[in-house]
Image: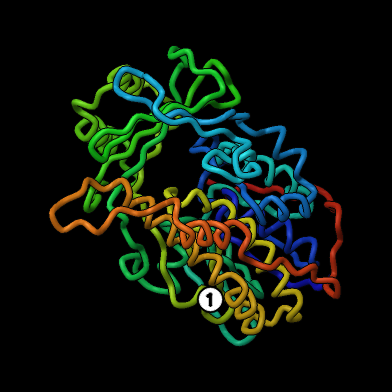
Amino acid sequence: MSGTRVLVAGASIAGPALAHWLRRRGAEVTVVERAPELRPGGQAVDARGVAKEVIRRMGLDAAVRAACTETAGAYTVDVDGNVLETYRADDDGGDGFISEIEILRGDLSRVLHDDTRDGVEYVFGDRIAELTQDADGVDVAFAGGDRRRFDLVVGADGLHSALRAMVFGPRERFVRHLGHVLAFYTVPNEFGLDRWLIDYQESGRSAGLRPIPDATRAMAMFSFPSADLDVDYRDVAAQKRLLRERMAGLGWLTPDILAHLDDTPDFYLDQVAQVVMDRWSSGRVGLLGDAAFSSSPMSGAGTGLALVGAYLLAGELAAAGWDPEAGFAGYERRMRSFVEANQEIGRLNARSRDVPGPDAEPSIDFDSEWFTELIERAINGVELPDYAGVPDSGAPAGSPITSSAKP
């Protein structure tokens, strides 16, 4: 065992995925999460191409597939519900518009947590209040009052990363708004939805329904253009008001779906945004997932980037003997082109939803050879070394270590 102590901020997907690989490489891992428990539900996320190989190497292929939504495909419809286009989950070898591995964010988070809770310390209901690093380590003060020292700290705390702001600077420096807002929440399945996602688009706005494992419920999805979002991402009441205002007059089943807005247990709304940074580390502190390189939901790749990034970050750090400078540099070198391809797809998809104006850029030819090549680079365009010379404990080991912050 290396005994290297690593603190990971965030227990959604990137954080527990990194904890899996760090533990297997011999590190002692603590994951701190400001929420009091794992957050259920959320939007459906996908794993394509090389991300599926990472899941296989984690030994979690069966567990992830067992928790999938089993969506058969997607229909785009007109205002009367007539089908305009059909996309199937087995298109493009399972790596198409609807991925063969499609799972609710909360369900994937639960699979990853179940896999890592033995041998990884989870601290819920707490957060990093401040940190100070020197040549040999990082001193961390937690909001709950604890003070501890770690060898490395990794921020996997999402688009609105508090750790990124603390170490690298204000969010405005790195977050790029793509001009759209997305909202998701579950509703009773009173719409006869089976295993098919349904999407309706009109003048830059969209409404949709997707199946989830609980067949008595469905996931509502909305998007609308917004040059800038001035609603606090923690103010749910204001977000619901905004959604009602922006969806007013939209046809199809929109009014019936909005009728469940006040009694849904899991409302989520946020801007479609990317995080663009020159570097994802500073000394002994690094970033992973959306905190480092959000590609936005428009790319369909955020989860894949988190899983692949977790594998490479842990592997490169271990291969470098836990030297942060060399380990972080190797991680960035391997990931950068892969990230940029996925971010480009996110930007193109967002642009394709814009309502054309007099100064609009030419429409995107999604059937062109260059776009096909871009897709391939975004799905498979990164090498996964086997890290043969690096320790790998393989199967999870250790006794449960779970703690909660004191109130």
Q: Residue at x 20, y 28 (%)?
A: 248
Give the amino acid at mark 1. Answer: Ser
Residue 242 figure quarter: top left
| Residue 252 vertical position relative to residue 296 in the rendered view, above or below | above
Q: How is the image coloured?
A: rainbow
| Residue 142 vertical position relative to residue 1 in the rendered view, above or below | above
Residue 26 figure quarter: bottom right
Residue 286 figure quarter: bottom right
Q: Secondary structure at mark 1?
A: strand
On the image, the x and y values in percent for residue 392 come to: 84, 64
Comparing 407 with 105, the one in front is 105
Q: Residue at x 54, y 18 (%)?
A: 194
On the image, the x and y values in percent for residue 363 come to: 30, 53
| Residue 399 vertical position relative to residue 68 in the rendered view, above or below | below
Left or right: 230 as drawn, with respect to 50: left
On the image, the x and y values in percent for residue 63 come to: 74, 38
* View extreme (bottom): residue: 135
Name the quarter where the N terminus is drawn. Answer: bottom right
Identify residue for label 1.
Answer: 281
Left or right: 230 as drawn, with respect to 18: left
